[in-house]
Amino acid sequence: MTSTHSSEYRQVAHTIRERIADGTYARGSKLPTEDELAAELNYNRATVNRALRQLGSEGLVRVHRGKGTFVMELPIITRDAGNRYSRANREHNGNRGAFATEVAAKTGRTPRADVTVDRVQPPIEAADVLGIDPDTVSAVRRHRLMYAGDIPLQVAVSYIPLDIAAGTPIETPDSGPGGIISRMTELGHEQVRATEDVIARPPTDEEAAFLRMTPDQRVFEVTHIGWTEDDRAVEYTIHVYPVHQYVLHYDIPMR
Amino acid sequence: MTSTHSSEYRQVAHTIRERIADGTYARGSKLPTEDELAAELNYNRATVNRALRQLGSEGLVRVHRGKGTFVMELPIITRDAGNRYSRANREHNGNRGAFATEVAAKTGRTPRADVTVDRVQPPIEAADVLGIDPDTVSAVRRHRLMYAGDIPLQVAVSYIPLDIAAGTPIETPDSGPGGIISRMTELGHEQVRATEDVIARPPTDEEAAFLRMTPDQRVFEVTHIGWTEDDRAVEYTIHVYPVHQYVLHYDIPMR
DNA sequence: GAGTGGTCTAGACCACAGA
DNA sequence: CTGTGGTCTAGACCACTCG
């Protein structure tokens, strides 16, 4: 009912959206081919293609070249920034934490992460915030690819000053119970607050490939910075999530 | 350097992006027409059109049918959820608050809001949270359209239980210094914390019209709920922002 | 009316998936 | 090899802007 008489591809998209909503096209099922839809609805295939691209960009359908177009099942994942970083949740059930718990609950799959750790020259933004040198190898980088079963869910890259992390468990892929935040506390760099900046942007080619996204879709880029009592930034992490699968949840104290 | 040999429209987009970055096409200036670009770059106009649509969806250019395509100037606005709701900032400089201050600083224009207030049947989601009846007129709705000068920046719709707001300044468009949060405190409903859920989605037709967006772009939808000491939700607000103009900033206490 | 973008069509060719 | 989607081209028509 929202549609005025806009362009034809929008009408096609609307029609398909309705058919998905009313169950004509069931969750997970394959849509008719573009040729079939074009014939049935009396439009050119290019028009149908554009409509499907629009729906794909919203995450409602997924298009596989050579196979067909499928209605997505959308287990929306809530990323709770509060729980995520409370000590209780961090040290809960091994190293898994709130993210893994949420993923397991919502998708029924096993959370998993591929972690690689190395020492690098930090990007300028990270170096600025962390107060380290962007021109020398002054940071430990932890690169994480996270999955639910075999479904990629998130990319995260963390930078930690080398003078804090060198030779510690932070430089090992499995950083142990409570993760690197707990390790940093043990090392005398307790994080007492964090800041996060959220934007939405198209995925890079690498992100699109890993997260199985199209250039039309969007990711949340969450820049997370961990701060100590004396206002030193000790962790700089960028999280990347496909927007159509996530809700970001924040708790805000008002006094 | 990110581009592999992807499709041609992506290459065209890449070329134009570079020209904007290196100043060949200055901020605010008009791009060559699609016909000119097609001729120069040796592609069909449809291909150039698709490239420009891509750039438009990212907020890098703005297309005006009949006039041309223009490089956007992007004063990115930081919406600070922490400062926004701290009492000090709320009661600062009249009713304007952090949002207005930020807008004024970043755009050099005068912040302005069109406010309409009425009593309505609340949408189900709001009614659930607020603990009121979705089938009767049980809420005051405050609908706000906000601008910087004549540039539309944000849509916000708030629902407040009628039993709190009836006959109070909350039902007047100008709710006075500190806004409705201060009014609610005076009425014995002090908000002590808030929660926010963030998603990114395409704009509705109405939002697209007001915010001057295309269906390819995205908005942040921030669902903001204000809670009192005894965990009653007393305010349910949905904020809508064009994603390409905003950074959402959060402060997260970790202990 | 001329300039400019939005979209549609018809036809073509390519790339990937799967039997 | 066939089915299916991704994209490009050429041409056309429409809608909005501005003189």
Image (tube, coloured by chain):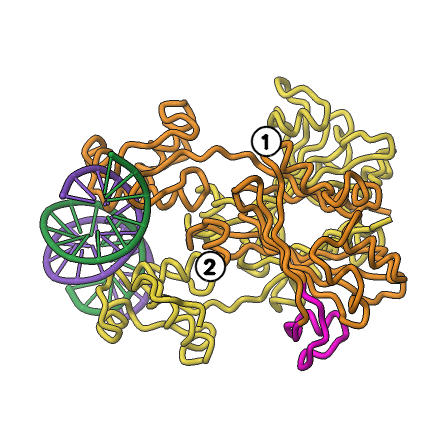
Chain colours: A orange, B yellow, C green, D purple
Mark 1 element type: loop
Residue at mark 2:
B58
Quadrant of the rendered image containing residue B37: bottom left
Q: In this rendering, would B216 be left or right of B244?
A: left
Residue at (80%, 72%) from the top-left corner? A163
Subunit of label 2: B
Q: Are marks 1 and 2 on the same chain?
A: no
Q: Quadrant location of the N terminus of chain A?
A: top left
Pointer 2 local density, CA inside 10 Å: few below 14, some 14–19, many at least 20: many
Return the x and y of residue B78 as percentages of the image width and height.
66, 60
Along the line of sight, the residue nearer the viewer: A115 or B8: A115
Return the x and y of residue A26 as percentages of the image width and height.
40, 25
Return the x and y of residue B92 as percentages of the image width and height.
81, 57
Residue B177 visible at all? no
Q: Nearer the viewer, mark 1 or mark 2?
A: 1
Q: Give the magenta part as a residue range.
A: A120-141
Based on the picture, tell me whether residue A122 belongs to the magenta stretch: yes
Pointer 1 local density, CA inside 10 Å: few below 14, some 14–19, many at least 20: few
Mark 2 element type: loop
Mark 1: amino acid: Gly
Q: In this rendering, would D1 be left or right of B59?
A: left
Residue at (40%, 23%) from the top-left corner? A23
Quadrant of the rendered image containing residue A30: top left
Based on the picture, tell me whether residue A124 belongs to the magenta stretch: yes
Subunit of label 1: A
* B162 relative to B157, above or below: above
Residue at mark 1:
A108
Mark 2: amino acid: Glu
Residue at (60%, 57%) from the top-left corner? B246
Return the x and y of residue B182 as percentages of the image width and height.
82, 43
